[in-house]
Image: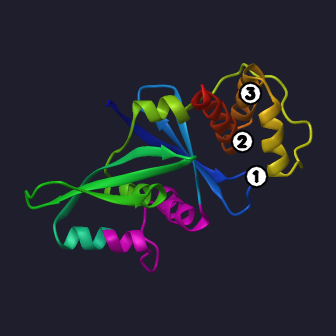
Amino acid sequence: MKLVQLDIERLEPSSSHKSSYVLLLSEIGGERKLPIVIGPCNAGSIAIYLESNQNPERPLTHDVIKSITNNFQITISRVVIHTLREGVFHASFFCFMDGDEEIEIDARTSDAIAIAIRMGCPIFTYNDILQEAGIILTDDYTPTYKDDDLQEETKKDVLETLSLGELKKQMNEAIKDENYEKASKIRDEINRRKDKR
């Protein structure tokens, strides 16, 4: 399977969950974006490094991991987001020590990315994951939900009643509004219907 390198485009608060954030990864040399919803702790760890590129006053968990790998000459070569299951991304980082065989270590995607930015190693995903979960920013859109205060359950019910064409139009609107979490939910509904075929 073909690997595609990603770059961190931005990190922003989720529009629908106050305690969550959306980490937007962009395809290097392409137009697709991969939105990943992460929790506040790892969002903070990533944001500290992205904004200042300096270590905090006291080391965070990902800084401790960096210190351990540096002190024991462990090289982290890359991070790979390898699976998307029920809307959740799964990742691994690959490392080796002094010419030993490279080993794969399973990790939460947000942890793997927080480590990758500290170690300066590349982030990859497979092309089929980008095909399934990636979004492309576009100006082609139509109006979406008129009531933004609808509860998430109600929104899900509404999605189930829409045609595939309407879903695609609403996803374009969500992308235009940079509401990547909503776009992800719509994408999941589209994929759920494809799986039923």
Q: Residue at x 42, y 77 (%)?
A: 59
> Mark 3 and mark 1: span between their CA atoms?
18 Å
Please identify the quarter of the rendering in which residue 136 is found: top right
- Which residue corresponds to mark 1? 16
Residue 35 percent across, percent down from the top left: 57, 43
Q: Residue furthest front?
A: 197
Q: Residue at x 22, y 57 (%)?
A: 95
- Vertical arrangement, residue 59 with respect to residue 169, above or below: below
Q: How many residues crowd mark 1 within 10 Å: few (<14), some (14–19), many (20+)?
A: some
The nearer-to-camera label among 3 and 1 is 3
Q: In the picture, which quadrant includes the N terminus?
A: top left
- Which residue corresponds to mark 2? 182
Q: Residue at x 52, y 58 (%)?
A: 51
- Vertical arrangement, residue 45 with respect to residue 184, above or below: below
Residue 22 percent across, percent down from the top left: 61, 50
What segment is highlighted magenta in the picture? 39-65
Residue 151 percent across, percent down from the top left: 85, 52
> Mark 1 and mark 2: span between their CA atoms?
8 Å
Q: Amino acid at mark 1?
A: Ser
Please identify the quarter of the rendering in which residue 115 is found: bottom left
